[in-house]
Image: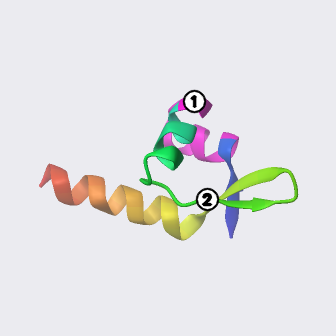
C-alpha cells in the first residue's frame, strides 16, 4: 500500500511541505507513479518507529 503525500500529511498531522522535507531528507522513502509521488505504508511505519525509539 502506498499513500499520497496529502494522506501522509493528514495521518502525521503535518503539512504537505513537511512531508516533502522528510522525503528530501531521506526520512521517508517515496516512489513516483505517473506524475504522482507516493509514500509506501512501510516507510511511514519505519519513520514512526524511529521517532519512538529516539524518544525512549
In three-dimensional space, the C-alpha distance between marks 2 and 1, rounded to whole angstroms, equals: 14 Å
Model colouring? rainbow
Q: Residues within 10 Å of mark 1 (few under 14, many from 20)?
A: few
Image-quadrant location for residue 11:
top right
Q: Residues within 10 Å of mark 2 (few under 14, many from 20)?
A: many
The image shows residue 12 at horizontal and vertical percentages of: 49, 42
| SS label for mark 2 | loop
Q: Quadrant of the C terminus?
A: bottom left
Determine which residue is flagged by label 2.
Answer: 30
Determine which residue is flagged by label 1.
Answer: 17
In this view, which residue lies farthest toward the left? Answer: 56
Residue 49 is a magenta residue: no
Main secondary structure found in the magenta portion:
helix
In the picture, measured across the screen, residue 44 lies left or right of residue 5, that is: left
Report the disc number at residue 29: none
Relative to 13, residue 1 above or below: below
In this view, which residue lies farthest toward the right? Answer: 34
| SS label for mark 1 | helix
The image shows residue 43 at horizontal and vertical percentages of: 50, 64
In the picture, measured across the screen, residue 55 lies left or right of residue 50, that is: left
Instruction: Identify the magenta region.
Output: 6-17
- Total residue callouts: 2
- Residue at the image point whose x is 68% and y is 64% from the top: 2
The image shows residue 44 at horizontal and vertical percentages of: 49, 59
The image shows residue 39 at horizontal and vertical percentages of: 62, 58
Q: Nearer the viewer, residue 17 or 42?
A: 17
Q: Quadrant of the N terminus?
A: bottom right
Amino acid at each position: 500500500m502506498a499513500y499520497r503525500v496529502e494522506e501522509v500529511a493528514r495521518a502525521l498531522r503535518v503539512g504537505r511541505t513537511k512531508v516533502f522535507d522528510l522525503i528530501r531528507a531521506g526520512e521517508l522513502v517515496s516512489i513516483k507513479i505517473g506524475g504522482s509521488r507516493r509514500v509506501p505504508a512501510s516507510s511511514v511505519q519505519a519513520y514512526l518507529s524511529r521517532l519512538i525509539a529516539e524518544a525512549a
